[in-house]
Image (spheres, rainbow, N blue to C red):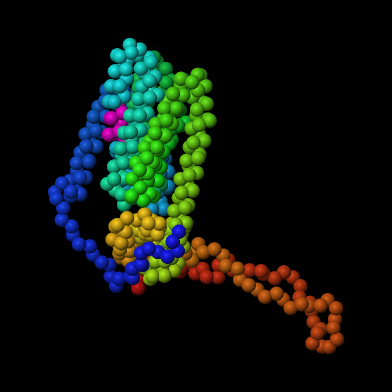
Amino acid sequence: MATSPPYPYPTPPSSAAGGALRHAHWWQRRWVRYGALSTLLALSGLVILALVREQTGTEGFLVGLGLAVLPVPLLMAAFRWLDRVEPGPWRNLVFAFAWGACAAALIAIVANSFATRWIATATADPSGANTLGATVIAPVVEESAKAAAVLLVFLFRRRDFTGIIDGVVIAGVTATGFAFTENILYLGTAFGTDQLTGNDGIASVTAATFFVRVVMSPFAHPLFTVLTGIGFGITALSSDHRLLRRVVLPLTGLLLAMGMHALWNGSATFGPFGFIAVYGAFMVPAFGLLTWLVIWTRQRELRTVRTELPAYAAAGWLTPPEPFALGSMRARRIARTYARRYAGKAAAREVARYEAYATSLAFLRHRGRQGRAGTGFVNRERELLNELWARRDAARPALEYAARVTAPPVPVYVPPAPYASPWPMHGPATHGPAVHGPRAAYGPTNPYAAPDPAPGFNPYRS
């Protein structure tokens, strides 16, 4: 590993530099692309809404919708928490969820129904066709449809896709949207069955479906698709010239997702206890292992921030305490709270943006030192540095305060007391009481910590 950076550190400007406007064709304009994508997703949503309502009925659709929405906020909050180190833009998450709930669900319903009917017609065995469709066709179609969202973000929002966590978050949010629509269909259908048979209470099909899909396994679809996201995330960490690796890794993740999905769907064919066996022996351990992996990756990203940013502090872009504060989630939270308390919500938002840009800068520098930054390293670095420089006045007081508050305790050396003999010595200078009692080995908890600001104090006021 190289000991010196391959690129020189630029010097801070006196003011933020502005970028030149780039002229693009009309089909390359942002509003055109966003409009076309939004129209596609909206049409897909209307079609999937009509299909689900046709199969469940209006009352079943409303019941399924009310029950299916329950796990969505928890899953979204979990993925957003994982993404706090370098939070991606909300538009990526909105696209991923909409793609999973609308486009991927529509593709899955149409393709699965067509394939199952074709197999049933060709084999004259409807029961076998349903089993084959659930264990083979559905995993392939559904995981491919969900993986398309990860691929689109990877190709067209490459700046926001820099590592494993980004892949996990995009894949997990896409799968959450897909599971949301699928749960509406299953729960609505179960409610319709209960209406026909007269079942109600905890013995109803609706209650059983809700327990299995929403209580026991709300993480099932995200768990499958996260494997695809990890494959794309590792690819994002690879060099651009390793074409074979950039193709094999996503495909490997996709195949693993299909295999896990097929095992989960086929658990019902393994006997009366097949579902419980697969759930306890495979799904739960896999969920725990992947949870540990993404949390470990999150801590590794924080270490990268603490390692890479001190060089920019030495170059004058950052103050010395900032790398420590930016490498601690607790310090970041304290900085945002401090800014909101003394300068309002606008300052807190600026601090949050400052933290995000600084993290992106650290990751970019890390890739540059390893030779994986690409040809656009210098321009991207200058862009991120300009964003930081434009927000320094709002962010630095809060980050410096957070660094002082979260700094580890510093022990203060206290010299040992002079030796006092218990036996009197000759001469007046040697007589006196012996020193007894404990002595403080350390000073205050943090001698460098600033006292709490007085009421009305505003660090942002010049």
Location of residue 318 in the rendering, given as x and y in whole percent from the top left corner: 39, 67
Residue at image coords 61%, 71%: 412
Residue at image coords 28%, 30%: 107
Residue at image coords 47%, 41%: 290
Q: Quadrant of the N terminus?
A: bottom left
- Left or right: residue 162 versus residue 403 is left
Residue reaching furthest top?
Answer: 124
Q: Main secondary structure of the magenta part?
A: helix
Residue at image coords 32%, 55%: 374
Q: Quadrant of the C terminus?
A: bottom left
Place residue 401 in its image quadrant. bottom left
Query: Does the segment drawn in magenta span residue 101?
Result: yes
Question: Height in image: 192 above or below 178?
Answer: above
Location of residue 334 in the rendering, given as x and y in whole percent from the top left corner: 45, 59
- The magenta region covers 100-109
Location of residue 199 in the rendering, given as x and y in whole percent from the top left corner: 42, 17
Question: Height in image: 390 above or below 301?
Answer: below
Residue 234 visible somewhere in the drawing = yes
